[in-house]
Image: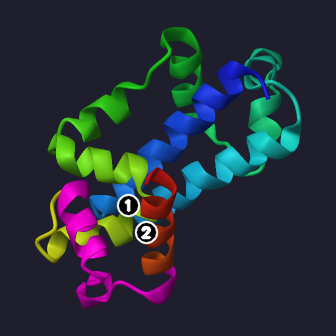
Amino acid sequence: MNSKTELVKNILLELAKILEYLGENRFKIIAYRKAVRSIEQANKPVDELYRSGELAKLSGVGKIIIEKIGEILETGKLQKLEQVKSKLPSEILEMLEKLPISGAKVKCITDNGIGSIEKLLNLYESNKLDTIANLGVKSIKSIKSYFNDIN
């Protein structure tokens, strides 16, 4: 994949994860993720797909997502992503960016009063991740794996 394709994919996935954290419409979130899968399966650079009009033929890539991809290709960023990021503290953005779990699971963690990676690391180091209400075994395993990898 080329760097523009990676940029588009990363921005759309980051937007989906933050929207999920914020409790936005789940169909929007699914649409962003589906668009990323379609771009990956197309096996062509996204800028080429955009210029040729082939993006519109991909499953899950509608007019609004095409406009967002155009903005990313033109400016290297997405205003909508900047807007939603501005609603959150940097500690939560860091959790959303670094933790290999869904935005909904990050929300679950913050709803339990854990508002930073440092606080989560403290729970991990004291073997208390399983005390976080509504956090499943799979998410706990992913978090443990993340902390194991950075240590």
* Span highlighted in magenta in the image: 117-138
Q: Residue at x 74, y 26 (%)?
A: 46
11 sits to left or right of 99:
right
83 sits to left or right of 40:
left
Residue 12's disc is none
| Horizontal and vertical percent position of residue 22 | 27, 58
| Horizontal and vertical percent position of residue 113 | 10, 72
42 sits to left or right of 37:
right
Residue of label 1: 20
Quarter of the picture containing the N terminus is top right
Q: Residue at x 45, y 21 (%)?
A: 77
Amino acid on which disc 2 is placed: Ile
Question: For the stretch drawn in magenta, what is the main secondary structure?
Answer: helix
Asked if the stretch drawn in magenta spans residue 137, the answer is yes
Neighbours of disc 2 within 10 Å: few (<14), some (14-19), many (20+): many
Q: Residue at x 67, y 45 (%)?
A: 36
- Marks 2 and 1, how far apart at CA: 18 Å
Asked if the stretch drawn in magenta spans residue 14, the answer is no
Residue of label 2: 143
Look at the picture and state if 128 lies above or below 62: below
Mark 1 residue element: helix
